[in-house]
Image (tube, rainbow, N blue to C red):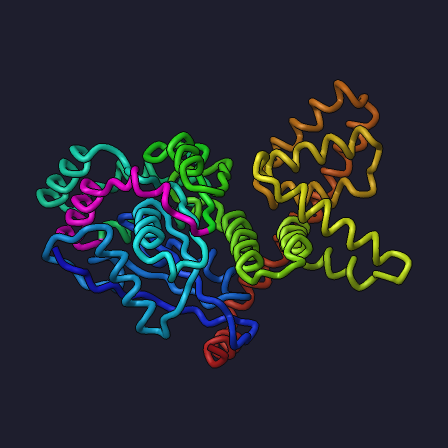
Amino acid sequence: MTTPIIHGTVLPVRNGAADAQLVVLGPSLGTTTALWADVAHRLAETYRVLCFDLPGHGSSPAARAPFTVAEVAAGVVALVDSIGGGAFHYSGISFGGTVGLELAIRYPSRLASLAVICSGAKIGAAEGWIDRAAQVRASGTAAMVAGSSERWFAPGFLERNPAAGGSALKRLVDVDDESYALCCEALAAFDETDAVAAIRTPTLCVSGEFDLPTPTAVLAELATVIPGARLVTMSGVAHLPAYERPDALATLLGEHLASAAAAASGNADSVFENGMAVRRSVLGDTHVDAATSAITPETADFQDFITRYAWGEVWTRPVLDRRSRSLLTLASLITGGHQHEFAMHVRAALTNGLTRAEISEAILHTALYAGLPAANTAFGIARDTYAALDVAADQAAAAASATSLDPSAQRQAEESR
């Protein structure tokens, strides 16, 4: 066995903070740093972000000698050391998640937080990985395209996003065959079922609603075994949520990172800090900034109360996930007749992973108990909110298209990099 050489790309923090913490993002088998592109862009607003490639994937050199998942973790540590070292946050999908578990087990002092996404302490049966390695050696990674398209994406994703899905599958074909096979054999030997209970790193476990290789039950068991770990199930995704719902995943990770950082700081007012982080992640910076700027001496205590107890204590409790809390909030607002806050929480529910269909179902269900007029008003507010969001999205897309077609704008963008 040998430690493989791992390469990656670094995104500098955009806010220019000299003390920005490092976030490392680990990929799934058969994918490259492109998997994390949209999420990394979001996180780079406040963090330095390092995305790495597995052996023979993307920019990492091909491997010819066997290696273990633990040795890939050692390669990641070497990569981090090459860009300055120190402690770092880590999030990984599938194979990347197994690397994260090895980091937490073997390098606990280096890890500030851990997010294990669509992964587990053991993934599948060893025989299945051995068979896949043999198939790739015989027929190449192209033989994995059909199966991966079914495993990676939720039903309908490839039809809705043919460009994103097609690009991901094309990159799979470009992966070095022997390196892919060696990764399969590393997963065949990987089993940290007994070791994960010793992890003390703040841990988030994320499952996908339609994930077949690592279903929610696997992540739920992992979250139960790791002390203090939190489980979140993302709706509408399968095995690669960073491709399928990057904005929702970025929001979830941003919340986790802020919570871990606040806890690590030993700040006596961590309840307030956690509350503010969750409040911003759910309601958005624009709304919270507006509320904060409007604080007067008469309302200061009330704003502190909202941040500290509503967002810092209730919304951060681990028993219910953000989706469930959004559903309850929508139903409560309808029942109480608080239409002035309903639009805000429709937006929040979308941020927390609910679909428009699920929000409509919640309103319909609440009509049984809160009354038809209240539900009718809620549907109207939701409709207007969606229309405003769609207009904003169309305007953003038009602006992006105009920029891409304008040579002078392209030159300016390139010169600013």
- The boundaries of the magenta stretch are 174-201
- Left or right: 11 with respect to 73? right
Q: Residue at x 51, y 70 (%)?
A: 20
What is the residue that sits farthest to the bottom in this orientation? Answer: 415
Above or below 222: residue 80: below
Is 107 inside the magenta-drawn segment? Answer: no
Q: Residue at x 44, y 66 (%)?
A: 22
Q: Quadrant of the N terminus?
A: bottom left
Residue 144 visible within the image: yes
Above or below 371: residue 260: below
Q: Position of residue 164 (x, y in %)?
A: 40, 50
Magenta residues, dominant SS class: helix
What is the residue that sits farthest to the top in this orientation? Answer: 368
Residue 392 visible within the image: no
Q: Position of residue 34 (x, y in %)?
A: 37, 57
Above or below 90: residue 318: above
Q: Residue at x 83, y 61 (%)?
A: 294
What is the residue that sits farthest to the right in this orientation? Answer: 298
Above or below 406: residue 105: above
